[in-house]
C-alpha cells in the first residue's frame, strides 16, 4: 500500500469518513471483534479482504493465496 497506513481507535457508535461518499460506523464492539456498517454509493465496490483475493469464478487470483 502506497502512503502507509492510518490507524484509528473508535468506540461503538462513532464513525470514520472516507472522502465525501463513504461513512463507516462502529455498530458493536466485542472482546475479539467489532461490527461495522458501511454507507456508500452502490457503485463503490466493498469486499472483505479474504473475499477480495478471489476472482469472479471463485479461483484465487495469480499471486494471491
Image (cartoon, rainbow, N blue to C red):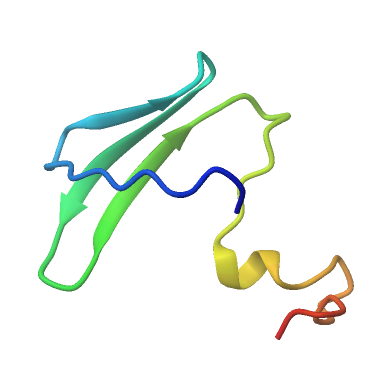
Query: Which quadrant of the structure image shows residue 54?
Result: bottom right
The quadrant holding residue 30 is bottom left
Which quarter of the rendered picture does the N terminus lie within?
bottom right
Q: Residue sitting at 67 percent across and 33 percent down?
A: 44
The percent position of residue 38, horizontal first and vertical second, equals: 44, 37
**Quick one: 57 or 32, which is closer to the camera?**
32
Instruction: Say which quarter of the image contains residue 24.
Output: top left
In the picture as drawn, the residue positioned furthest to the bottom comes out as: 65
- In the image, taking residue 13 as reference, residue 50 lies left or right, namely right
40 sits to left or right of 35: right
Using the image, determine if residue 7 lies above or below residue 21.
Answer: below
Outermost residue to the front = 3
Q: Which image quarter is the C terminus in?
A: bottom right
Question: How many callouts does the rendering have?
Answer: 0
In this view, 51 is above or below 60: above
- How far from the left and from the top, in percent, is residue 63? 81, 80
Residue 52, given in percent of the width and then of the height, sits at 68, 64
Residue positioned 71% across, 71% down in the render: 53
Which residue is at 24% across, 58% downward? 34
Viewer-proximal residue, 47 or 64?
Answer: 64
Q: Is residue 33 above or below residue 38?
A: below
Q: Nearer the viewer, residue 1 or 9?
A: 1
- Looking at the image, which residue is at 48% across and 49% down? 4
Amino acid at each position: 500500500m502506497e502512503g502507509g497506513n492510518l490507524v484509528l481507535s473508535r468506540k461503538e457508535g462513532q464513525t470514520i469518513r472516507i472522502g465525501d461518499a463513504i461513512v463507516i460506523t462502529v455498530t458493536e464492539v466485542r472482546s475479539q471483534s467489532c461490527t461495522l456498517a458501511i454507507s456508500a454509493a452502490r457503485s463503490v465496490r466493498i469486499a472483505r479482504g479474504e473475499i477480495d483475493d478471489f476472482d469472479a469464478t471463485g479461483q484465487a487470483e495469480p499471486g494471491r493465496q
